[in-house]
Image (tube, rainbow, N blue to C red):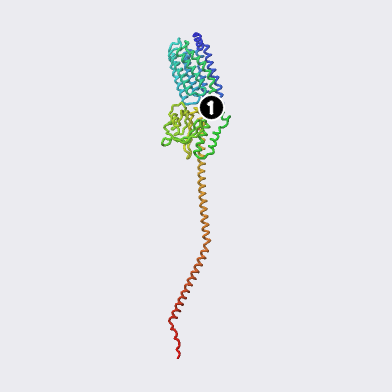
Amino acid sequence: MLSFYEQFLTLLTTTPGNLTYHLVLVFAIAGALPGALGLWQNTGAPQARRLLVGLGMLLLGQLALIVFAGLARFFIIPVALLPTLDRAVTAFSLVMLIWLWVFPEPQRRADFASLLLILVILVLAVFSAVWWSGQPQENGFNGLLADMVWAAFNGALALVGGIMLYVRRPPGYEIGLGMFGLLFLGQAVHLVFPRPAGDFPGVVRLSQLAAFPLLLTLPYRQLTLVIGSQGAPARRTAGIDPDAYQAFLDLATHSEPQEIYQAITRSVAYALNADLCLLISPPDSQNVITVYCGYNQSRREDLGTATFDSTLVPVLSEALRQSRPLHLPADSKLPDLDGLSKMFDLKLAGSVLAAPIASQGDTPAMALLLLSPYTRRVWSVADQNYLADIARALVEVLRRSQGRRALENSLDQTSRALQSLQSENERLSLAVDDLSAQKALFPEIQELQEQLRLALEEIATLQNALMVSDLRVTAADSTEVSQPEPQPETQT
């Protein structure tokens, strides 16, 4: 049985069996390319473009091995480089598989880490080729120190890829775990039992023959991610959600600032299918960030105002100060994720997406903040651009709202002034009526005054006449007293 096993491994590492190995891997990769190409042409999603690039790099690596294997039959120098190139392409393929399976959504940190690993592989390949060129090549490359280093390095890549995939658990991660498990098993067995004797690891190639056909499932996994991130087919077939319709309607009809802010958070939460959407301010002079309002789509409830210390979210605070958009993946080690979890009492904050709303005139500077603590949604580049477009459009919405509010205040002031003028007009009308009444009575007063004057004159005339009469009476009385009384006659 062991002899058959070694014969089979030898078949995979020598001509013409090694050609079968290369063709199977090439066909497995090429079989997934049409699905990735069709997905990218139909949706233009960044996930599809990422898949297309990753599969293309894998295919180029395998084609490079085939070209060098063909050249090795005619040239001496490539023969010494071929074992190192084989291990380097295997390591490069593992990096690309991690890039595709573990990070299906575009992420700068993952891309940067992948580039660093590729540079490490190039450096290791150069040292390995130089070392192998100076060694006697009769016994083959298998089992030597350089081969063991490559087996340990590639096994570590497969193990780390499987662990990261299990931790992140993107859609379809189970198939990816099976692929990384097969590749790790091949490297581990070759590290312990480097068979057969020769330049190429037969058991590693056997594990690759079993694992690479699983790449055919990647386009369907990416299709699930695209539908989940865009959500367009479900919305088109089922119609718009009533709550989402009401949110957009409120955004168009409300005029009060707080009502506008609340309608904005609801509308953005539904538009981007975010668990939490918050409208916040940049840090003020006291390093305090204000939460104007928010919306929890999972619970369908509005969130009130709040404040928190900007030192809990240093990266977000700096982005808000500079009016820059921000994307923090859920797996990043930045303190902002822990700070947001504590502030909103969340187990995990999830991916964070923020976009500034530029201030205009007296409109205060604000920003939209999206969290995905419940669905653990991964934001894509398309989501970031969409949120940035919404933020730019909201500048005009807030400006019009502010203008409408100012107009309403002006109308209120005008209405109050008009009421005041109407009251003053009524008062003046009463005053005019009083004056008119007083003018109407003025001739009668003058007539009474004339009559009173005549009466007083008559009274004075009568008093004078009375005094004359009194004097006459007094004079008459005095005359009667002074005359003697007559004497009676005497008879004789």
- State the residue lying farthest toward the front: 492
Q: Quadrant of the C terminus?
A: bottom left
The residue drawn where x is 51% and y is 65% is: 448
- State the residue lying farthest toward the bottom: 492
Residue 364 shows up from this direction: yes
User: In the figure, residue 252 lies in which quadrant?
Assistant: top right
Q: Which of the pair 420/224 is nearer the observer?
A: 420
- x then y, percent, for residue 353: 48, 30
Q: Is residue 223 above or below residue 253?
A: above
The residue drawn where x is 51% and y is 54% is: 427
Q: Which of the pair 454/127 is nearer the observer?
A: 454
What count of labels does the image hold?
Answer: 1
What element does badge 1 sit on?
helix
Residue 391 shows up from this direction: no
Residue under label 1: 228
Q: Is residue 253 above or below residue 53?
A: below
Q: Which of the pair 410/144 is nearer the observer?
A: 410
Q: Amino acid at mark 1?
A: Gly
- x then y, percent, for residue 410: 51, 45
The residue drawn where x is 45% and y is 10% is: 139
Q: Which of the pair 331/63 is nearer the observer?
A: 331
Q: Residues within 10 Å of mark 1 (few under 14, many from 20)?
A: some
- x then y, percent, for residue 58: 51, 20
- x then y, percent, for residue 345: 45, 30
Q: Is residue 460 above or below residue 46?
A: below
In screen coordinates, is 132 left or right of 232?
A: left
